[in-house]
Image: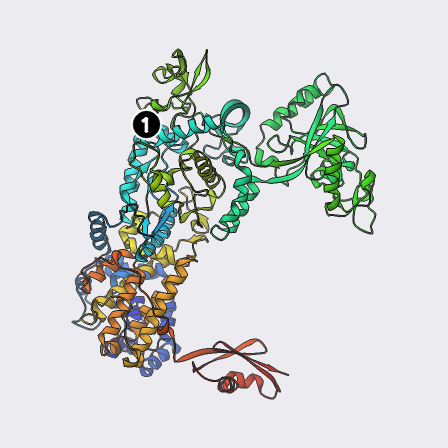
Amino acid sequence: MKRALVDSCFWIGLCDSGDEWHSTSLDVFSELVEEGFEIIAPWPTLYEFLGTKNLKPYYLDKLKKYIVDGRVVKFDDSPFRERALRALFDGGARKSLVDWIICSIIDVHHSDFSFLVTYNPKDFLDVCKKRSFAIKPERPGNFSMTKYDPLAIEAKWQSRWTQGRHFHVEADPSKPRYYVLEMFPYPSGRIHMGHVRVYTIGDVVARIKRMQGLNVLHPMGWDAFGLPAENAAIKRRLHPAKWTYENIDNMRAQLQKMGYSLDWERELATCDAEYYRWEQLFFLKFYEKGLVYRKNSPQNWCPDCHTVLANEQVEDGKCWRCDSEVEQKDLEQWFLRITAYADELLADLETLSGGWPERVLTMQRNWIGKSVGCEIDFPLEEGEGAVRVFTTRQDTLWGATFMSLAAEHPLAERLIKGKPQEGETRAFIEKIRNMDRIKRQADDLEKEGVFTGSYCVNPVTGLKMPIYLANFVLMGYGTGAVMAVPAHDQRDFEFAQKYGLPLKVVIEPRGETLDADALTAAYTEPGLLRDSGDFTGKDSGDAKIAIADWLEAAGKGTRAVNYRLRDWNVSRQRYWGAPIPMVYCEKCGVVPVKESDLPVRLPLDIQVRDDGRSPLPDNAAFVNTSCPACGGPARRETDTLDTFFESSWYFLRYCSPKDDTAPFDPEAVRYWSPVDQYVGGIEHAILHLLYSRFFVKALRDLGYVSHAEPFANLLTQGMVIKDGAKMSKSKGNVVDPDEMVARYGADTVRVFMLFAAPPEKDLEWSDSGIEGAARFLSRLWRLVTEELAGVVAPTGPCLAQDPEALSPLARELRRREHATVAKVAKDIEGQFQFNTAIAAIMELVNFLFANVEALRAEDPRAVSSAVNTLLAALSPMAPHVCEELWEMIGHKTLLADQPWPAHDPAALATDTVTVVVQVLGKLRGKIEVAADADEDAVKQAALAEENVARHIAGKTVRKVIYVPGKLVNVVVG
């Protein structure tokens, strides 16, 4: 049996076309069927086609009959279609899987033919001719040779925007401003789809705000220092500077191909001395203010990367970069006293409510971790001194039966010295010191400990309490000591069960008595105190306040506030970073560099080490210097600053990036700040955002800025994933943005990234999805350049028209035009629902296509207005093709410079409305009624609806509830 492939583009073209094409194409189709061909058709497209309203009943019935008779084989197998097409066009090198093919010529390059033809329809016809089979073109002799060439169009408009400096802005107090910013990228070498998503989101916001008449700042720069660049350069035997700057050039070119409305004249890189000289100044100012100090403390140390790691950079006890086992190492480090701002950082989160995702606010609150309680001393049984604890549960003090200390506690050495178990305890201390700190805080951690051989005394009961070292207690929170109340704390309960330690119940539910020996878990709920001295019988909540008062009066304790937040360690033992501007003098000690000597430049004529160790300590030209205080010999600090230091203020530098006299112009910062819309990944929800908030508050107190928060609004976008997993080279699921732009164009990539998922959700990459976006833009192109050619004029969007003078079709077009503008603005403005905004635009395109023949006979102003509005509304998402079409219909000014269309609320009124009809709350039908129909008429129409009538037949209608214009609910009994 002969076979004929009827490809998707045939059916799509058929749905969009008029009666002449229906007749011609179905005649060819019928001939094939009648001659015994087996028809192969893609079922999803065919199924959609069968529901079209464009096809006359005669043709639709005929096609359905073929399908019912089994003469159309339904398939949904793209690989088969590709194999069939390749075989058909390979010049006879192998047996063809099909003998004929029917398609729509104009759409051929946007379907599965893309691998074998160029964008010129003539090339396709030539191929067809060589294979000796006939294909009838859509509307023979009437297809446009003005092709949609996205690459040429995009290059044209990117050049035009750059040459005209269309996105460069200056501070202008006479204009309302808007600052939109995406988290700047680390220059890894190539942008990935995650970059494309975040910068596309930000660009849409920037373009719409610009069209709304705001003075929009939308800058770009590079987070260029850091360990990843240094390790990558070492691996390639390159200098980090060479690697970084080459990557910046590559990524800049890639981003420019996406058509983002960035002010490239404000570009900065944090590895430039012109940038980091100012953060060195901030370091000195913080030092003067007492916000910078140096101390010895145990740190997470990666032996392979030769540097300190933050807790968040330790994953399952291993370095996040090189997977080496992390050790604990005592080091002299520089810290920023971020805890001095803990209260303000916590309190000011309330000012961000509504502008930041609640999830991020919660994460910040938990990270700051404010706790209100008491500090209480437990005297040591032997010798002077006491174990001081911080607790929020002073109401359980009478139930404390043992003490748990962190392995790093300063008393540990004294407590174990000379005890029989000293050796065992020292081994435990070494083991716990090298444990992952995050893992030590996990709820599912197996509790382990060792008895020190020493005791302390409960200050209210006189009980001699054994002192243990425990793996779940850290020095980083409270005092590093926990009064263990196993009857009322689950961690203590598990520890006591494991080591046979006593439990004492001191809180129990009202009306119940708890037996300590019968407990299977700690009782942690509120209740009444028992066996608690004068507080017995009191409510536990009230008792907390009363006991705190009593402890202070008795001199046994004091009220205290504690924070989970720790001071920020900014020292890094690597080369590729900003030098810390401090020197060490044997005579004067630690001395800050003079401001006039800034910047302390990172030497670039230096060879990085293969093992990753910083070469700075061995570079005499860098290390050896003079003391700023006495002029004697001194040595420079060879640690460099944590890269979070750079990213904590870059948004301020963008306000005046070329200023060589100050970090930024105060007036420019006052005009532009704070950032109105910040966009970035949820992975930065804690550290980067918290450090940026701290920086702004500290700089405010130093007189540099006048605002208190860096980012008024925050959007955290989801990841781009493929095959259910985050894209990575190791998984083989990476999609290259350059390849997609080369194949489909930047506008298609942008539309897909916006349409595929709401921004806060993960986006699953889909080849069919991006092909769908390409078809949509091709369809838009055809609508303007072919279907409505000669009709559309440069009227501008939302043209004022007298609705009474319009035909019903033109009036409906006008309603849809204005409704589209209103929905797009609403969906994007506060909700960032780009997918639904694009869907609304697609609906308008579909309406225009469905009525194209009738619209050609209408008043051209109505059609022109709708098309002008369509291009303006879509332009923030697909700016290049919209600019090109805008110019083609006769506009002399750029669409990027046009105001956002202003919809007329009166135009949204409809003659009819759709009312949902329910019976006993279940959907049973829908009715169309006049918009001004009275309630009785609507109820009668609802009861008469065929399906509704069937469900209420034989039943008593007890009530009919009407929600005007929306819903009728029929209650029967």
Give the total number of marks visible in the rendering.
1
The residue that label 1 is drawn on is 239
Relative vertical location of residue 308 with respect to residue 687 in this rendering, above or below: above
Quarter of the picture holding the C terminus = bottom right
* Residue at 54% in and 34% down: 339
Work out whether residue 37 can be spotted: no
Closer to us: 78 or 408: 408
Picture coordinates of residue 421, whole percent (x, y): 72, 21
Q: Is residue 125 left or right of residue 780?
A: left
* Residue at 34% in and 67% down: 903
Residue 7, picture quadrant: bottom left
Residue type for callout 1: His
Picture coordinates of residue 84, whole percent (x, y): 30, 61
Picture coordinates of residue 395, whole percent (x, y): 74, 40
Work out whether residue 317 can be spotted: yes
Relative vertical location of residue 125 with respect to residue 580 in this rendering, above or below: below
Closer to us: 480 or 445: 480
**Colouring of the image:** rainbow
Residue 591, picture quadrant: top left
Quarter of the picture holding the N terminus = bottom left
Q: Is residue 502 left or right of residue 859?
A: right
Relative vertical location of residue 322 with respect to residue 11 in this rendering, above or below: above
Relative vertical location of residue 717 with respect to residue 586 in this rendering, above or below: below
